[in-house]
């Protein structure tokens, strides 16, 4: 590019910027078009035509109150449903093999839901001093038995 063509290009940019500035500063202050705002009814009709549902403030509050009362009734019905008062008793047949430990027995009893915690069962066996007295065999135990009763059945 020569310097002459470069000056011509720069001059064109200056002229274009000047014209844009003049239009911006001396043109109309607001965008052209309808300055008339639609009425409330026209706005509602337009929104309903698009698939929206229009409610007044009172209708909206009534719907919220109705939904809350339905929720309260459902919660009240849940409270009136009584849970069974019977205690569920789990019974299992426990097979103790030679070489088993009190931890193994506790884990099997916990799986069968006869006791809640295998470690606590093992600790109770240790406290009674019967950890080495495990008798191999098959035993029937249930969750209604106390830990001491289960220990006395399975251990010497």
Image (cartoon, rainbow, N blue to C red):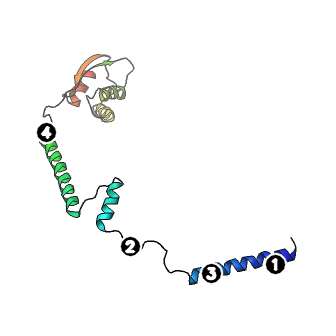
Q: Is residue 32 above or below residue 149?
A: below
Q: Dot 3, crowdedness within 10 Å: few (<14), some or many (≥20)?
A: few
Q: Dot 1, crowdedness within 10 Å: few (<14), some or many (≥20)?
A: few
Q: CA distance from mark 4 to mark 1?
A: 91 Å
Q: CA distance from mark 4 to mark 3?
A: 77 Å
Q: CA distance from mark 1 to mark 3?
A: 21 Å
- Quarter-of-image position of residue 103: top left
- Residue linked to disc 4: 81
Name the element at disc 1: helix
Q: CA distance from mark 2 to mark 4?
A: 61 Å
- Left or right of 14 in this view: 136: left
Q: Residue at 88% across / 73% down in the picture?
A: 2
- Quarter-of-image position of residue 138: top left
Q: Residue furthest bottom?
A: 26
Q: Earlier in the sequence, mark 2 or mark 3?
A: 3
- Left or right of 58 in this view: 94: right
Which is more foreground, mark 2 or mark 3? Answer: 2
Contact between marks 1 and 2 (CB within 8 A): the answer is no
- Residue linked to disc 2: 36
Q: Give residue 7's mark.
A: 1
- Residue linked to disc 3: 21
Q: Earlier in the sequence, mark 4 or mark 1?
A: 1
Q: Earlier in the sequence, mark 2 or mark 4?
A: 2
Contact between marks 2 and 4 (CB within 8 A): the answer is no
Instruction: Give residue 125's position: percent from left, percent from top.
Output: 29, 31
Is 4 in front, or is 85? 4
- Left or right of 115 in this view: 85: left
Q: CA distance from mark 2 to mark 3?
A: 29 Å
């Amino acid at each position: 590019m020569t310097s002459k063509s470069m000056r011509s290009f720069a001059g064109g940019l200056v002229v274009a910027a000047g014209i844009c500035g003049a239009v911006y500063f001396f043109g109309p202050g607001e965008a052209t078009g309808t300055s008339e705002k639609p009425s409330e009814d026209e706005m509602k009709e337009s929104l309903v035509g698009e698939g929206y549902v229009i409610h007044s403030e009172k209708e909206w509050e009534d719907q919220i109150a109705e939904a809350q009362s339905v929720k309260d009734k459902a919660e009240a019905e849940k409270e009136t449903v009584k849970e069974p008062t019977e205690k569920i008793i789990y019974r299992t047949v426990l097979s103790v093999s030679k070489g088993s430990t009190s931890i193994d027995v506790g884990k099997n009893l916990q799986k069968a839901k006869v006791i809640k915690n295998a470690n606590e069962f093992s600790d109770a066996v240790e406290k009674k001093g019967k950890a080495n007295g495990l008798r191999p065999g098959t035993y029937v135990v249930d969750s209604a038995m106390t830990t001491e009763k289960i220990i006395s059945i399975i251990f010497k």
